[in-house]
Image: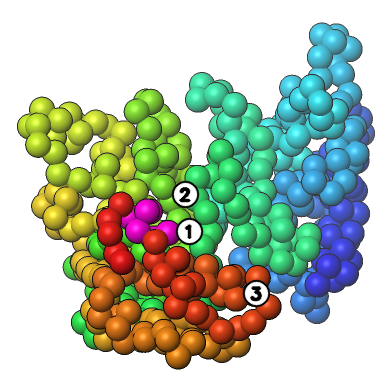
Amino acid sequence: MVTSNVHTITQELDWFQQLLALRVKITFEPSKSEAEMAKVTPPSLANDNSPYAQLIHKYQMDMQERLVLILALIPHIKPALLDILNMKNELYDIPFTEFGGVRLDKHKGVLPTGETAAFLLAGSDLEKRFAVSSLFGKAHFFHQEGIVSLQPFSSNEPLLYGVLQLSPTYLSLLTTGKVFKPHLHPNFLAKRIETAQQWDDLVVSDQLQNGLEEIKTYIQYGKQLKNDYQFGTKIKPGFRALFTGPPGTGKTLAAALLGKSCHTDVYSIDLSVVVSKYIGETEKNSSRIFDRAEKEDWILFFEEADALFGKQTDSNEVDNRYANQEVSYFLQRMDDFDGLIIVRSNSKMTVDDAFIRRFQLVLDFEIPNVHQRYILWQQSKTEEFSYDDAVNIAFLAEQHELTPASIINILHYSMLKCMGRGDTLIQLADIEAGLKIEQRKEGKNII
């Protein structure tokens, strides 16, 4: 894939270089005609199956769109191509305004802007300039698919002064041929969650399993029902589910398994971090996540939701929270999200009734019953380890009301003790020591 992309991009760069050189000549040499630009045609990609060519084929990109795409890519792969735009207007001793571009302190090259694209495609033709502006509108696939955008430095500057930015997803696809998976960082407050476990590892009631099957059905057929059968006019976009229950009962695992089984990425977001008390911060934090998630078709899994969705005893606190425009903005984005949102809460009883109504499905992850705990004790250890005859897992299941996470923690501790002894036989003393550790964590006597 990398090799095929290199070949395609090299052709596009050669074409771009010809256009750039000709545009500069037309600007400064009166003998040159605008009609000559039309003679510099983009290379044929008819038999090209590289990821770069496939993207162009998918959206049937015309000459203007192809130029914007390669222009957005150039700072990442061959920034020196734009050095000619550093030429100064000798009369004013500043770079030519019509060239556009941004010059930073550390990056000595030119970062192309919408103005740069307009210079190349329109020159001084006002009608063509308007056509270039439409490439960055909300109706264009560049915006709708999150391929290329203009990033303004301030809200007061003209549209085309924004820096031309290729999204990380498409930067990765067009260079390495691989899909970019973003990681948690200050400007992107979401973390991808994955699991190596299978559905058999999630030991829950039949009722809860049926609820998870409903969500799987939505992931597989929800958008088809909305679009192909025109049912979208009758319902709100997307699907919202509330997972309640004590920590360690499988809520996060269930979300990860839903994504795994449906081949969909799941991103976890800590609501206490996203929803800020500072004006404008929640909007910025939320927009980055929701916009990206809709374009990539992610499942969003919101954690630490009790602070936002929880009941308040003070009526003034309730009024203030509902009146808070930052929280209101987040809730509106959640309601408008055309995909699956899962919100995690430690207890349904603490969630405000007004928020409960926002969810199509509420699933309660309870502490496993005796039979379920027996299954967990039985299947959670690896096959290489076995229980000593003194370990009665039926007794353990009946006597100790533990979450799946606690049972796994105890077995993890016990198997490490085995390895320290040089054997694979889990002793009762190992289990009891692990139980005491869980007792101290939970603050209750479980022995």
- Residue 433 appears at what percent x and percent y? 45, 66
Range of residues picked out in magenta = 437-442
Amino acid type, label 3: Arg
- Report x, y in % for residue 342: 33, 62
The answer to which image quadrant residue 234 occupies is: bottom left
Q: Is residue 13 above or below residue 413?
A: above
Q: Nearer the viewer, residue 132 or 321?
A: 321
Q: Image point 79% across, 22% down: which residue?
A: 105
Q: Position of residue 209 (x, y in %)?
A: 29, 82
Q: Amino acid at mark 2?
A: Ile
- In the picture, the quarter occupied by the C terminus is bottom left
Q: Which mark is residue 439?
A: none
Tell me the distance, in whole angstroms, between the alpha carbons under discs 1 and 2.
Answer: 9 Å
Q: Label 3 to label 2, Cα distance in Å?
A: 48 Å
Dot 1 falls on a residue whose secondary structure is strand
Q: Is there a contact, CB below 8 Å, between mark 1 and mark 2? A: yes
- Structural distance between the alpha carbons of marks 1 and 3: 40 Å
